[in-house]
Image (cartoon, helix red, strand yellow):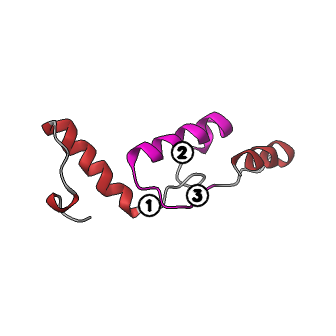
């Protein structure tokens, strides 16, 4: 799909956005998507109106990653407040 967006842009000059489906749950998955978009479409697509991650469960994983960075241990999901 990302390559189709790139081809469409090259043919028309019109930028269209992309929102990956499938439930992005981890910070690692979000970084993979960011890398894919930047490599295939370029830096211009890394903005909210052209690329959006719609994953509410992603916030919990980011909080756990920050907790791990600060304490050196991972928190269980029940140890952090729900966002």
- Residue 32 position in % (x across, y down): 51, 41
Left or right relative to 67: residue 35:
right
Q: Are marks 2 and 1 in contact (CB under 8 Å)?
A: no
Q: Residue at x 16, y 36 (%)?
A: 72
Q: Residue at x 39, y 50 (%)?
A: 26
Mark 2 lies on residue = 33
- Residue 41 position in % (x across, y down): 67, 40
Disc 3 is placed on an element classified as loop
Q: Earlier in the sequence, mark 1 or mark 3?
A: 3
Left or right relative to 79: residue 54:
right
Quarter where residue 3 is shown = top right
Circle 3 Cα neighbour tier, 10 Å, few/some/many (<14 / 14–19 / ≥20): few
Disc 1 is placed on an element classified as loop
Residue extent of the magenta highlight? 18-45
Q: Earlier in the sequence, mark 2 or mark 1?
A: 2
Q: Is residue 26 magenta?
A: yes
Left or right relative to 27: residue 9:
right
Rounded to the nearest angstrom, the CA distance separating label 2 from label 3 is 10 Å
Circle 1 Cα neighbour tier, 10 Å, few/some/many (<14 / 14–19 / ≥20): some
Rounded to the nearest angstrom, the CA distance separating label 1 from label 3 is 10 Å
- Residue at the extreme right of the image, as rendered: 11
Depth check, mark 2 against mark 3: the one in front is 2
Q: Earlier in the sequence, mark 2 or mark 3?
A: 3
Mark 1 lies on residue = 55
- Residue 48 position in % (x across, y down): 52, 53
Mark 3 lies on residue = 19
Q: Residue at x 61, y 44 (%)?
A: 45
- Residue 36 position in % (x across, y down): 59, 40
Q: Residue at x 46, y 46 (%)?
A: 29
Front residue of 68 and 46: 68
Disc 2 is placed on an element classified as helix
Rounded to the nearest angstrom, the CA distance separating label 2 from label 1 is 12 Å
């Amino acid at each position: 799909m990302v390559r189709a967006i790139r081809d469409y842009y090259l043919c028309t000059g019109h930028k269209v956005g992309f929102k990956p489906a499938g439930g992005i749950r981890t910070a690692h998955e979000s970084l993979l998507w960011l890398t894919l978009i930047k490599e295939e479409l370029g830096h211009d697509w890394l903005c909210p109106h052209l690329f959006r991650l719609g994953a509410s469960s992603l916030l919990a994983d980011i909080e756990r990653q920050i907790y791990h960075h600060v304490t050196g241990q991972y928190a269980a999901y029940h140890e952090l407040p729900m966002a």
